[in-house]
Image (cartoon, rainbow, N blue to C red):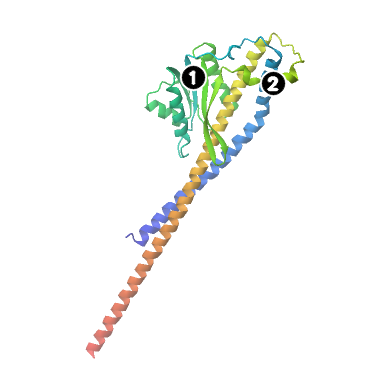
Amino acid sequence: MANTKEIKNRIGSVQNTQKITNAMYLISSTKMRKAKEELDRTRPYFELQEHEIRRIFQTEIDITSRYFYPKTGRRRAETYAYLIITADKGLAGAYNQNVIKLAEEEMAKHKKTKLYVVGEYGRRYFQRRHYEMEKSFLYTAQNPSFSRAREISSILLEQYDNKEIDEIRVIYSDMESEFSTIVKMMRLLPFDRREFWTKQEEKNEKDVHYDFYPNVNEVINRVIPGYVAGCIYGALVDSFSAEQNARMTAMDSANKNAEELLADLQIQYNRVRQAAITQEITEVAAGAKAQRKKRKKEE
């Protein structure tokens, strides 16, 4: 059995670790709150862009844009691009593993894929397994910003416009609630025009006419890149928030485990200390008894 000094050292070690996990919990909480506030501030801008696209499709019929499926329906893509959003580090439960699992399942369905990874954890994972990645695509998952989303979207759009890729999909995490995080896959491009209108909206706008300069196709081709960047920004923030929530959950669990371990160690310490005290009392009593016997013999 360990002695009191060893147990006290273990208690001190657990307490120091608990301070670290508690600090990480508080940091993740602050980061998640700031990211959500920033997204809420920019959300009206992206919602306005989506509304403009809806209005264009409600008032114009003959729109031919490379960013949309043709009116006849969806066409089969040859080369799929996957934008995978992971964290830069672990200590977040199954957050990274769940994203990677879905990514591997989806990519296995297609012969030709291109991989774009945000986050150092995902890059290291796919690199170790010899996946072919875009080498110059070195974006961090920390502190997502719209400028970063715009850079990512410009890279993807350039390859899409050059017909190097036919369909772009984003795999990311979304926090449904404080206790539930799910992994989602979003088709980024091409869009389905049917997703931008409803029967009720069509009814409300059917008598309204708008003029587009220089033409409707040029207008929509100018609007879409900003909307795509907004979608990527939303996915980055959702993933970052989900990561911080997962890390908060993991650190909270670690704190609870530390409390239980400290309680067990304290009980163990008390038992060892009590045993030591009892042993000392026994030794003193035995010594006193021996002294009394010695005195009697001398008498």
Residue 20 shows in this picture: no
Count of numbered tags: 2
Q: Quadrant of residue 225?
A: top right
- Indicate the amino acid at tag 2: Lys
Q: Quadrant of residue 220?
A: top right
Q: Position of residue 149 (x, y in %)?
A: 57, 24
Q: Which residue does the image show at 39% across and 56% down from the upper left?
A: 9
Q: Which residue is mark 1?
A: 81
Depth check: give the residue in front, 200 or 132: 200
Q: Residue furthest right?
A: 207
Q: Is residue 246 above or below residue 60?
A: below
Q: Is residue 219 above or below residue 176?
A: above
Binning the other alpha carbons within 10 Å of mark 2 as few (below 14), some (14 to 19) or many (20 upward) gives: few
- Which disc number belongs to residue 199? 2
Depth check: give the residue in front, 285 or 59: 59
Left or right of 191 in this view: 49: right
Q: Residue furthest bottom?
A: 299
Left or right of 119 in this view: 64: right
Q: Position of residue 132 (x, y in %)?
A: 41, 20
Badge 1 marks a residue whose secondary structure is strand
Quarter of the figure with the N terminus: bottom left
- Indicate the amino acid at tag 1: Ala
Q: Position of residue 91 (x, y in %)?
A: 46, 40
